[in-house]
Image (cartoon, coloured by chain):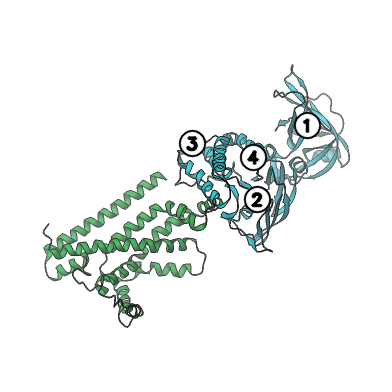
């Protein structure tokens, strides 16, 4: 394939970003989804709405607020400066943070549905078999929610690969640091390098299709098992 | 001794109990749906919050709100068999059995070898040795319930709670599980609370009976006493009947009949091969008993008992009444129409003859 070194770099960065985002999202979204599926607190509805926000908000809005927050005057920026970490905007870490927020609903929702589907009975059974709540979470709830976890991981990964607006707002398109495939395509188009843009765009198309196909096949197999 | 003080109020339901139950044998909890049977069991297990009360099993206090004690479910050494299959679907039969056993070892001072022995005994008791490698979705309903029961008893709990363990099974599967439950009762020392709405299960399995209605205790005591009282015909419905203890008094080989003698009379039933002198328990359904004011002549019914009317009370349907007859030391129930009571002018205290159409051996 006639890809430039810059394009290869963008592809590599995209996969690094998506892998890290997916990993951190699973760690973060699993307890959050569990809480959402179990709690009867009045906070449930507002938290649920907040987690779902990135689904409906234009990425530029999300990116704009993140940019402000991470900037030297923003609350997050003040914090990172005071810790001696510098400012996160236009860095890979900043991009990672943005991706996590942006893909949060794609991780939380499948997990929450999986936990809801388990119902309360298996956890009650575990309690009558001497399992503490934490023990039961790891030995019963998580294994039973495995299909939901796989779906959450695939969707988070694919969604991060496909993000554009947030990256542009807070990443700034710096080669090797924050330039991912989607912004690389944008750059090629701006520079009228349609051939380069074609290769990357087709790659993204095939990748996204394959991911959704795999997901659909997995869901069908599960339904057959159940 | 099991002491239960439970007080739960929900919007349209209140459960309010303060009772003591025997510390051994099967206590059946009978009552119409919505009477609080399952709520009682869940409160004992700590699955539902009992805001105020006391639960003590033998010397162990599970809850005492005055002392500020309330163990969470997982710290109560109990076994719980749910109404429907409750096997953990991601674990094999062996893993299901070990799930509770492993954890109860950690939280108590049972020795590993004892635990292994208890596990092997429960596998043998419920005959599930051939199922150990299977996954729950490869088992039949009856097999799943047997595994669930084995899983509960393998932990050697202080109390075994069973919530209609046979309700989700068809009649054939139910018959398949009965013998195992009877074995549990005979071979294990742990007390059991057994929720049911089947009079058959009560008469075949229970030693003690607790009848609930609308969240209140309607009656409790040894099975034979409580069943004979006309507690609430609605509760037992078509199955209402008396339980009579006696022994085989004679066997008539020519007609294939055997006679059960009890204090207050004798009845003939089909010969089941039991020897003379053998203690038996028989059930006489209220619908199989008719009442006559004089000694019946020329009737095909072989069994007649003499007694007097102890009480007449309303039955489930307005056309019928439940008549309790005292025959010697035993009580027999008769379900008759109101019109018959009127035509025969039946009154409490009247001497009558009871004609018994059929008798079933229960134990």
Of all chains, the one bearing label 1 is B
Instruction: Assess disc 2: are there few (<14), some (14-19) or many (≥20) residues with their C-alpha within 10 Å of its C-alpha.
Output: many
Q: Is residue B220 visible?
A: yes
The tag on residue B188 is 4
Instruction: From this view, report whether residue A207 is shown above or below residue B31.
Output: below
Identify the residue position indicated by label 1 in the image: B246
Are discs 2 and 3 located on one and the same chain?
yes
Furthest-top residue in view?
B254
**Quadrant of the snapshot with the C terminus of chain B:** top right
Instruction: Assess disc 4: are there few (<14), some (14-19) or many (≥20) residues with their C-alpha within 10 Å of its C-alpha.
Output: few
Q: Can you tell which chain is drawn green?
A: A
The tag on residue B131 is 3
Residue positioned 46% across, 63% down in the render = A35
Residue B54: horizontal and vertical position, in percent? Answer: 68, 58
Asked whether, in this view, residue B57 is left or right of residue A223, the answer is right
Of all chains, the one bearing label 3 is B
Tell us which disc is closer to us: 1 or 2. Answer: 1
Classify mark 3: helix, strand or loop. Answer: helix
Q: CA distance from mark 3 to mark 1?
A: 41 Å
Q: Can you tell which chain is drawn cyan?
A: B
Are discs 4 and 2 located on one and the same chain?
yes
Mark 2 and mark 3 residues within 8 Å of each other at the beta carbon: no
Classify mark 2: helix, strand or loop. Answer: helix
Of all chains, the one bearing label 4 is B
């Amino acid at each position: 394939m006639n890809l430039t070194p810059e394009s290869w770099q963008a592809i590599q960065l995209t996969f690094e970003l998506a892998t890290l985002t997916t990993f951190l999202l699973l760690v973060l979204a699993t307890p959050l989804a569990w809480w959402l599926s179990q709690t009867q607190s009045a906070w449930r509805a507002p938290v649920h709405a907040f987690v779902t926000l990135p689904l409906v908000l234009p990425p530029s809005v999300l990116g704009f607020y993140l940019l402000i927050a991470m900037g030297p005057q923003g609350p997050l920026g003040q914090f990172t400066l005071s810790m001696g970490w510098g400012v996160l905007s236009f860095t890979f870490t900043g991009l990672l943070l943005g991706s996590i927020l942006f893909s949060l609903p794609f991780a939380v929702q499948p997990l929450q549905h999986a936990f809801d589907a388990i119902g309360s009975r298996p956890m009650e059974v575990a309690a009558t078999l001497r399992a503490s709540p934490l023990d039961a979470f790891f030995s019963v709830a998580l294994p039973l929610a495995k299909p939901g976890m796989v779906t959450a991981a695939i969707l988070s990964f694919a969604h991060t690969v496909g993000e554009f607006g947030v990256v542009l707002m807070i990443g700034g398109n710096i080669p090797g640091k924050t330039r991912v495939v989607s912004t690389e395509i944008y750059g090629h188009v701006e520079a009228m390098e349609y051939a380069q843009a074609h290769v990357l765009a087709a790659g993204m198309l095939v990748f996204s299709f394959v991911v959704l196909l795999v997901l659909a096949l997995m869901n069908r197999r599960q339904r057959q098992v159940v | 001794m099991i002491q239960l003080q439970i007080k739960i109020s929900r919007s349209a339901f209140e459960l309010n109990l303060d009772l003591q139950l025997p510390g051994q044998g099967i206590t059946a909890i009978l009552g119409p749906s919505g009477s609080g049977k399952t709520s009682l069991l869940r409160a004992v297990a700590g699955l539902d919050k009992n805001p105020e009360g006391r639960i003590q099993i033998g010397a162990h206090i599970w809850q005492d709100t005055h002392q500020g004690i309330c163990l969470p479910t997982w710290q109560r050494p109990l076994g719980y068999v749910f109404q429907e299959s409750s096997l953990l679907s991601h674990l094999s039969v062996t893993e299901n059995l070990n799930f509770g056993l492993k954890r109860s070892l950690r939280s108590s001072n049972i020795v590993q070898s004892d635990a292994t022995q208890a596990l092997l005994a429960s596998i043998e008791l419920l005959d599930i040795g051939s199922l150990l490698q299977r996954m729950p979705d490869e088992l039949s309903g009856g097999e799943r319930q047997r595994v669930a029961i084995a899983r509960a008893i393998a932990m050697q709990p202080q109390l075994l709670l069973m919530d209609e363990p046979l309700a989700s099974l068809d009649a054939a599967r139910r018959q398949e599980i009965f013998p195992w439950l009877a074995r549990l009762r005979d071979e294990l020392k742990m007390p059991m609370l057994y929720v049911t709405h089947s009079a058959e299960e009560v008469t075949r399995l229970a030693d003690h009976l607790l009848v609930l209605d609308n969240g209140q205790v309607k009656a409790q005591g040894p099975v034979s006493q409580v069943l004979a009282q006309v507690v609430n015909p609605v509760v037992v419905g078509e199955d209402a009947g008396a339980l009579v203890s006696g022994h085989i008094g004679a066997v008539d080989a020519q007609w294939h009949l055997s006679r059960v003698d009890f204090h207050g009379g004798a009845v003939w039933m089909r010969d089941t091969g039991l020897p003379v002198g053998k203690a038996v328990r028989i059930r006489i359904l209220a619908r199989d008993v008719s009442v006559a004011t004089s000694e019946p002549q020329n009737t095909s019914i072989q069994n007649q008992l003499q007694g007097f009317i102890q009480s007449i009370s309303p039955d489930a349907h307005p056309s019928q009444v439940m008549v309790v007859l005292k025959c010697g030391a035993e009580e027999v129930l008769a379900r008759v129409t109101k019109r018959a009571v009127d035509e025969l002018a039946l009154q409490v205290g009247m001497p009558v003859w009871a004609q018994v159409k059929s008798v079933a051996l229960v134990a």
